[in-house]
Image (spheres, helix red, strand yellow):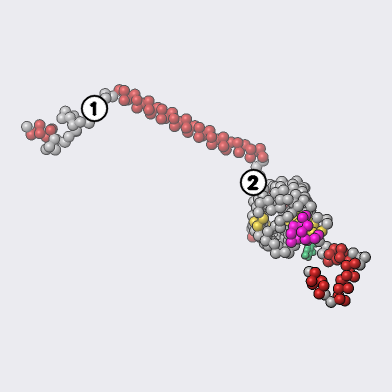
Amino acid sequence: MRSLFFSLPPPFLLLVLLVLLSPWPVWAQAPATTFPSGPRGDPDCPEACACVPGGQANCSALALAAVPAGLSRRVSALLLDHNCLSALPPGAFVGAGALLRLDLRENGLRSVHMRAFWGLGALQYLDLSANQLEVLAPGTFAPLRALRTLSLAGNRLARLEPAALSALPLLRALNLQDNALTALTPGLLAGLPALDSLRLRGNPWACSCALRPLCTWLRRHPPPAAEAETLLCTSPRRLRLSPLTAFSDAAFSHCAKPLAPRDLAVIYVLGPASFLASLAACLALGSVITACRARSRRRTAARRPPRRPPDPDPDLEGSASPADPASPAAAAAQA
Ligand SMILES: *[C@@H]1O[C@H](CO)[C@@H](O)[C@H](O)[C@H]1NC(C)=O
């Protein structure tokens, strides 16, 4: 270093000295203007990402195959969009407990472990759009009690179980557009009391009884006209292209009413109880029959004379055939 410094031509050396000794903090400002991020090696910034003082860690489009290490509670927004995270392992974001915003768009995500979002109790905004998710395990979003906005748009979801979303008491906006959903499972919307924006277009809705809860919800929360026009049945054929918002409650009058919780409780109690009762009855009946049989066997055994040993006995008929020339009976007949 020193030899390089001294081998520089004198005019250049002079320039370097001038800059170094200048009263304006040229060096101090230069990195701040060319890199708005915190310096590399900042303990609060995951390596490879660019961080800004507000707590945003920008790790967009870095071809990352895993969530970067070094997440801290100082990070409030984590941008991981346009990377190559094909799976999220359990506890993928532990350490980032103060995270409010998480962007995972366009990662080719195929699986999210049911405990991937553990520790993100403050998260308000989660974007999982434009991935390749086909199913979501039960409880995946359960830790996200503060979630307000969730996007699952542009995936391959054909079913969305209520248990996957769990109860998200503060969720206001849910985007499900451009998936493979044919219906929303009953109970899904019931767990989302604060929901007021639901994006649904681009799904092959099957207009059957299973669509009733969704149609009921849509009547109570009418979507903007532009969105409503795009919500169309794709099956059955006679309802093809009928708008979902056109079905009144009367359209579902032929459908069986869903069971009330009390009926369900009765079924759940009666089912196992009757099973146990019949099991007990079978056991009791079986043991009574066995006991009766054993008793009658004992009684007949007491009445009958004791059985003789099976020794050959000439007086006993049938013990040997008279036709048998070697038998004592045949010998007696001959004599
Ligand atoms: C994050 O970084 C990328 C690339 O460095 C940039 O294009 C993008 O605008 C940044 N995003 C934000 C929200 O600052």
Please state the horizontal and vertical placement of residue 233, each as a whole percent of the image. Answer: 68, 58
Amino acid type at circle 1 is Arg
Q: Residues within 10 Å of mark 1 (few under 14, many from 20)?
A: few
Please state the horizontal and vertical placement of residue 52, each as a whole percent of the image. Answer: 82, 58
Q: Front-most of 193 and 211?
A: 193
Q: Residues within 10 Å of mark 2 (few under 14, many from 20)?
A: few
Disc number for residue 330: none
Question: In the structure shown, which secondary structural element does the residue marked by tag 2 occupy?
Answer: loop
Residue at (67% x, 50% y) in the render: 115
User: Label 2 belongs to which residue?
Assistant: 256
Q: In this picture, which residue range is highlighted in magenta?
A: 38-50
Q: Front-most of 130 and 331?
A: 130
**Furthest residue in direction right, as rendered:** 23
Residue at (58% x, 36% y) in the render: 270
> Where, quadrant-wise, is the C terminus in this rendering?
top left
Residue at (82% x, 71% y) in the render: 5
Quadrant of the rendered image holding ligand 1: bottom right
Question: In the structure shown, which secondary structural element does the residue marked by tag 1 occupy?
Answer: loop
Amino acid type at circle 2 is Ala
Q: Earlier in the sequence, mark 1 or mark 2?
A: 2
Q: Specify the principal SS of the magenta part.
A: loop
**Furthest residue in direction top, as rendered:** 303
User: Label 1 belongs to which residue?
Assistant: 308
Q: Are marks 1 and 2 in contact (CB under 8 Å)?
A: no
Q: Is residue 49 magenta?
A: yes
